[in-house]
Amino acid sequence: MDFASLIEQYGPATVLSVGAAVIGVVFGFAAQRSRFCARAAVIETAQGQWGPRFCVWFLAFASALVAVQALVLAGGLDRGATRFIGQPGSVSGAIVGGLLFGAGMILTRGCASRLLILSANGNLRALLSGLVFAVTVQATIAGWLNPLRQWIAAWWPIDPGPSRDLLALTGTGAVGALVVSALVWGAAVLMCWKGPLRSRWAALGGMVTGLMIAAGWALTQVVARNSFDPVVVQSLSFSGPSAEWLMRVLSSATAPGFGFDAALLPAVFAGSLLAALVFGEFRLEGFKTENRLGHYLLGAVLMGFGAVLAGGCTVGAGMTGGAIFALTAWLTLISIWVGATVAFRVSRSLGLAT
């Protein structure tokens, strides 16, 4: 039975939900086992190291690049149909939002995806921070933070189409993009496989984590092409779905219908929980004396506001949007890295726990 038949029989929402659930479980399991964490990767580079945590992130990102560009070259993804290229954006939003998100994830000790994975492992600090993150995301989308977001985004708007497409701006075609991506992947393997990343399972987990980005793009594109109903072409993201689940918990009548986003978050949680239970790593962990509650809450607010302003988090914009070579996604990723590096160095100079 092909996708068209599945969609006709069960409907696009069901197919998207089931597909996202599978992708989410695999992502959560692989990210938990590989210790995938953008914050830890930034800290290693801020200390002048190419350590194991950076290598896991680099392998994940490089794998996403190669797989997504191979998908594009094979005709399995229309980059122009995605929100990162096909809709208006904001350069100022990407930069300012990325800086704020980066600083926030240092204070909160994890980005949005990492907080979800840690919550599934019993970390109550991550759970509280994730809830504050979700509330802030919703307040930034349609609440009292929305005017501030729109004001910053209006500083430097950018039109959809070639203006947001790095491949169009640089004159690089689909083949060239795949070659560049393959070179990045090769560099990641050479740097990490026999270097800092001695665990082959961590390397494999990092690569599987990145491949789930391509799987998300492939799933939503094939459903969009075979459905009579409009379907958003998207992949993994954790800011929008967090707000969606908050709305669903508070008032199911106003929440969006079930689909890719709705199934993704609980599936990632389940995958991480499964890994923690299987390998005996589940344990309840609360705030300790040296933990600073204010840092976690402030960081969660900065991440929530920054994610919406920038158009995504480290995964939702940095990896998902970066893998299709969207200009604003790369600006967001670079800004997150800069903001996190500055925040880490300032925190360390002040003697604060990082």
Image (tube, rainbow, N blue to C red):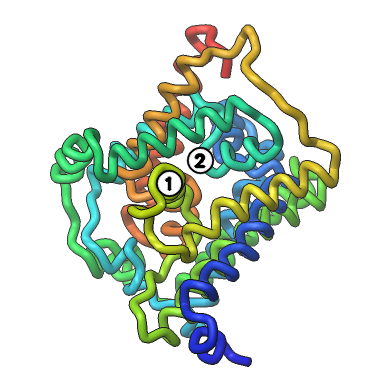
Residue 144 position, x and y percent, is 22, 34
Horizontal arrangement in the rendering, residue 77 relative to residue 47 (left or right)? left
Q: Foreground residue, 300 or 200?
A: 300
Horizontal arrangement in the rendering, residue 145 relative to residue 270 (left or right)? left
- The residue carrying mark 2 is 112
Q: Foreground residue, 123 or 215?
A: 123
Q: Foreground residue, 91 or 108?
A: 108
* Residue at x 76% of width, y 52% of height: 193
Horizontal arrangement in the rendering, residue 42 relative to residue 122 (left or right)? left
* Residue at x 66% of width, y 45% of height: 55
Query: Which amino acid type is shown beneath numbered disc 2?
Result: Ala
- The residue carrying mark 1 is 239
Horizontal arrangement in the rendering, residue 261 relative to residue 92 (left or right)? right
* Residue at x 37% of width, y 46% of height: 332
Point out the image quarter for the N terminus.
bottom right
* SS under mark 1: helix
* SS under mark 2: helix
Q: Is 265 drawn above or below residue 48 in the view shown?
A: below
Residue 116: name its quadrant.
top right
* Residue at x 42% of width, y 39% of height: 134
Q: What is the number of the mark on residue 34?
A: none
Q: Is 92 drawn above or below residue 169 in the view shown?
A: above
Badge 1 vs badge 2, beta-carbon distance below 8 Å: yes
Query: Which amino acid type is shown beneath numbered disc 1?
Result: Ser
Residue 160 position, x and y percent, is 22, 65
Q: Work out whether mark 1 precedes mark 2 in sequence or the reverse, and give the earlier one.
A: 2
Q: Would you call the spot at circle 1 few (<14 residues within 10 Å), some (14-19), or many (20 or more)?
A: many
Point out the image quarter for the C terminus.
top right
Residue 224 position, x and y percent, is 41, 79
Residue 318 visible, this angle: no
Residue 176 visible, this angle: yes
